[in-house]
Image: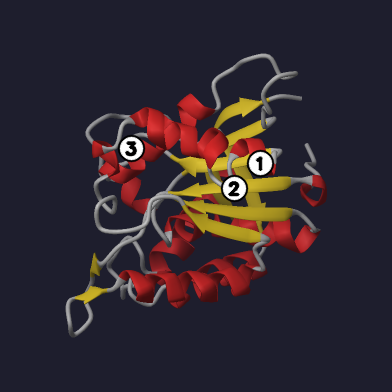
Amino acid sequence: MMFDWSAQRLLVIAPHPDDEVLGCGGLMHKAKSAGAEVYLQFLTVGDTADISAKGFSTADERVGEIKAVADHFRWDDWHIAFPGDDYHLRLDAVPRFEVANMIERLSPLSVANVEPTVVLAPHRLSYNQDHQAAAEAVHTALRPSDTRLRHHPRLVLAYEEAADQWRNEPTTAPNLLVELDQAAVDAKIAAMRLYGSQFHDHPHTRSELTLQSLSVLRGMQGGVAFAEGYHAMRWLV
């Protein structure tokens, strides 16, 4: 089944800067190359512990990385909903209503404002508390209702990250595969390198070999060279 990415408007929900690359960097490249619109809603960013000499990257440094990645992918716009250390790695302490309302209607890049045809969000079984909070908030924000009154994206996908394999609950394998070519895989890895504070040498869940290997695995499962795996939450055809 062919899907016309050129006609789509994508809204990607990323708990932190780099999650969008890890989860759907290949798809963003593929869609944008086809002519789609791509918007990024980051939920939070703050000072972040890393492996640099000083042991952390500042929020300003992380924002600088976002700008480089935005230029790399040619995003149409991006926004941070809850900036600062009061929220970073603490989204589970924010009432779900507040996060969901931001995604649904309050953010400049909310579902109501962007009216996306495709929404991509983290999987709820991540070990990371911010990812869990983001996934639950997106689930609430995209609840079914009268499409004449609220915008309903026709395709809603939960993306996977290699780190999601560390979890307490079993889950099914991705039920939707997006084929990638070598250029899309290369663009994904190049974007991750632009997140220099988060990129790691192997073995690590955010290494080049891990990203390459996961794309090969998902491609093999679909009988193609490379792919990204997703869990379809809504597919209205």
Tag on residue 113?
Answer: 1
* Amino acid at the residue labelled 3: Gln
Q: Which residue occupies 56% across, 48% down?
A: 12
- What crowding class fits label 2: few (fewer than 14 Cα within 10 Å), some (14-19), or many (20 or more)? many
| Residue 41 versus residue 126 in the image, above or below | below
Q: Which residue occupies 63% across, 68% down?
A: 73
Left or right position of 173 against 133: right
Tell whether label 1 touches label 2 (CB within 8 Å). Answer: yes
Report the quarter where the C terminus lies: top right
Where is residue 64? Give x, y as percent.
45, 76
* Amino acid at the residue labelled 1: Asn
Residue tagged 3: 132
| Residue 129 versus residue 182 in the image, above or below | above
Mark 3: secondary structure: helix
Task: Judge whether residue 113 can be spotted in this image.
Answer: yes
* Amino acid at the residue labelled 2: Leu
Tell whether label 1 touches label 3 (CB within 8 Å). Answer: no
| Residue 48 versus residue 221 in the image, above or below | below
Give the quadrant of residue 113: top right
Considering every residue shown, the one lying at the far bottom of the view is 53
Where is residue 21? Give x, y as percent.
49, 60
- Disc 2 or 3, which lies upstream in sequence? 2
Residue tagged 2: 109
Q: Which residue occupies 51% across, 28% down?
A: 141
Q: Nearer the viewer, residue 44 or 55?
A: 44
Q: Which residue occupies 66% across, 70% down?
A: 183
Mark 1: secondary structure: helix
Q: CA distance from mark 2 to mark 3?
A: 20 Å
